[in-house]
């Protein structure tokens, strides 16, 4: 693919570049989101293990961004290795896939992207070493460009649900910093804003990692979209007092029943909207949809207790060694969800039918 | 009243002394809860304005503690002033009442305690200057001792709702540090623990001021009650996963309809419990009950945006000057509440009847 040409077409939507492929140097580059909004530091590597570490440590986070980064991790594994022949190369890629797959268990896009890269490897296998290497990089670039395009389409479909003077509550960061660029739920908000709609945003701070207070604040300020920051537990009163009239969030994994795994607290956002008769939308690319019907298939990641005990890894807010429970995600049941916005349109209830139709129709 | 004798009777329940009257020095003394759990610093004063500041700045917080502290503030105003006669004294007390009443708008106990002290002033008025002064101090001491006794009775009634092997979710601090001693919702948990029940606690961290992460952790560790700390937004998954089987919280203001104003986030705790068929209890003394039927009478305090922008007043977690919305409380509607535990028993639905009976029956 012609990367420059593709990116040129998307330029007006790419005001923030959270991660990209440096073709001249053959390196993967990403913004370290842990330092946002205080510092804007790009990091770069040729080592796929460094990409795995960046995902594990949440330098790169957000299900779509994780998927794209993992694909580029595979490209690095293909480009830089000691393999002497196709078999050694494929063994090396399998090893890289395992390491990258072990970083975060909930984001479905991670497994989707790794499977897609390995399917490409399979299809190039008979064509020889160089074709496999080229194929992996090409597939990673395709996944990258598609993610941006999908986000823009999600924005286009989702913006139809946004009305003039809406105040939209969102939770966690689902913007450019959670994707290859543009964003999913925050992409819908961004798209509506670019269309000239007069909207406002209320963002939660999103404890423990503060994706709202750090990343949403940074993105919303850059766009000039008016917003207010709230603590996570204020989502109830915000809907009760009619200070927000709809909610849009992203997703880390969606199954065909419409159960949505997303950042811890999404379930209480949905409950709060539902109890006050406000629509609650989920925005995600179809790469987030796991084609199964059993909610118990959704793995919920538990992260370090230090994320709760300390703010940003350094400021203690309780006693050392306090026991905690730190699930990174929760599952919102379909009855609380008004619609699921994908790049192929908005799925409504019954989700089993509409989501199945969406993933089967290309 | 004989303070020493009264306190002696309550000794076994008073393992933490959050505030008290120093009879020898005629001073009001309190633990600065802003520094808990890192430092245990008692502060003391003879200046009622200093008490007002301590309430406003949340050195003293929790509706019952605020009420008791305000009463002691009035005692200081009565003891230390330049009044030449009864009229000047009463004018001075009226001024002190206004200043103390202006500190926090939601906690009903504050107004209840100030009204009670001023009613005592009225009843002593004809007996002369010294009787008024003695009366104010005596009334403050009565309010103090009654609060502890009421907490113990709340614990006794509430503990009947606690079963062996319960895991109880609580939000904000409602323990000794929120009262004259012992606690309301955390008092119920404490009472059940003293009775030997094998229970566990899940406490939210309670952003923005972290009463859970700081104060509950400190109290629960002192008691040896096993607990886990969660971020506020995890209340949904905790009930969904059956990790807690009931919730108990305190209240800053309850009206006769059963609408309960309490720490921001209480409403989403109640919604989360209710959506998962778990009982949700409120524990508070009758001094928290405002005898009105109109929820619009409940004033919701909005506090400084810096509480959200910075942790513990110092560690920044977002950009300077970010606009926020920081309501300190929300209102939980009665349909989500299983019972309201008072020192006179547990009120169940319909609350209008049961709460009216409770406040009219002494």
Image (cartoon, coloured by chain):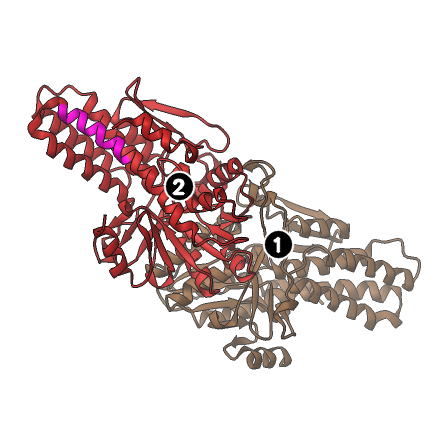
Chain colours: A red, B brown
Confirm whether residue A105 shows in the render: no
Compared with B47, B358 (above or below) is below
- Badge 1 crowding class, 10 Å Cα cut-off, few under 14, some 14 to 19, many 20 or more, is many
Span highlighted in magenta in the image:
A131-143
B106 vs A117, nearest the viewer: A117
Res B67 → quadrant: bottom right
Q: Residue at x 38, y 50 (%)?
A: A157
Q: Quadrant of the C terminus of chain B?
A: bottom right
Residue A100 position, x and y percent, is 24, 34
- Label 2 residue SS: loop
Q: Mark 1 points at which residue?
A: B61
Residue B98 position, x and y percent, is 78, 59
- Horizontal side of A204 relative to B46 (left or right) equals left
* Mark carried by residue A183: 2
Compared with A60, B353 (above or below) is below
A140 vs B318, nearest the viewer: A140
């Amino acid at each position: 693919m012609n990367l420059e040409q593709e990116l040129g077409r998307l330029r007006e939507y790419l005001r923030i570049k959270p991660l990209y492929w440096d073709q001249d140097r053959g390196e993967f580059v990403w913004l370290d989101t842990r330092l946002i909004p205080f510092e804007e530091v790009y990091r770069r590597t040729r080592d796929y293990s460094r990409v795995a570490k960046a995902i594990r440590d949440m330098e790169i986070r957000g299900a779509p961004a994780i998927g794209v980064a993992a694909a580029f991790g595979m490209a690095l594994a293909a480009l830089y290795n000691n393999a002497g022949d196709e078999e050694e190369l494929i063994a090396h890629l399998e090893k890289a896939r395992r390491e990258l797959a072990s970083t975060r268990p909930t984001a479905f896009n991670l497994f989707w992207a790794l499977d897609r890269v390995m399917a490409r490897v399979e299809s190039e296998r008979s064509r020889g070493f160089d074709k496999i290497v080229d194929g992996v990089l090409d597939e990673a670039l395709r996944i990258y460009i598609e993610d941006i395009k999908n986000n823009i389409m999600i924005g286009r479909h989702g913006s139809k649900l946004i009305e003039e003077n809406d105040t939209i509550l969102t939770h966690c960061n689902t913007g450019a910093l959670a994707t290859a660029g543009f964003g999913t739920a925050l992409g819908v908000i961004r798209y509506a804003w670019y269309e000239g709609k007069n909207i406002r945003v209320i963002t939660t701070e999103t404890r423990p990692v503060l994706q709202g207070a750090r990343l949403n604040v940074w993105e919303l300020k850059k766009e000039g979209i008016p917003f207010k920051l709230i603590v996570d537990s204020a989502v109830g009163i915000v809907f009760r007092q009619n200070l927000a009239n709809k909610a849009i969030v992203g997703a880390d994994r969606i199954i065909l029943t419409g159960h949505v795994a997303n950042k811890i607290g999404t379930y209480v956002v949905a409950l709060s909207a539902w109890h006050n008769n406000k629509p609650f939308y989920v925005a995600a690319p179809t790469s987030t949809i796991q084609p199964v019907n059993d909610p118990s298939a959704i793995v919920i990641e538990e992260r370090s207790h230090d994320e709760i005990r300390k703010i940003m890894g350094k400021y203690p807010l309780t006693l050392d060694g306090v026991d905690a429970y730190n699930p990174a995600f929760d599952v919102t049941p379909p009855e609380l969800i008004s619609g699921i916005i994908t790049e192929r349109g908005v799925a409504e209830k019954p989700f089993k039918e509409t989501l199945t139709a969406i993933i089967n129709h290309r």
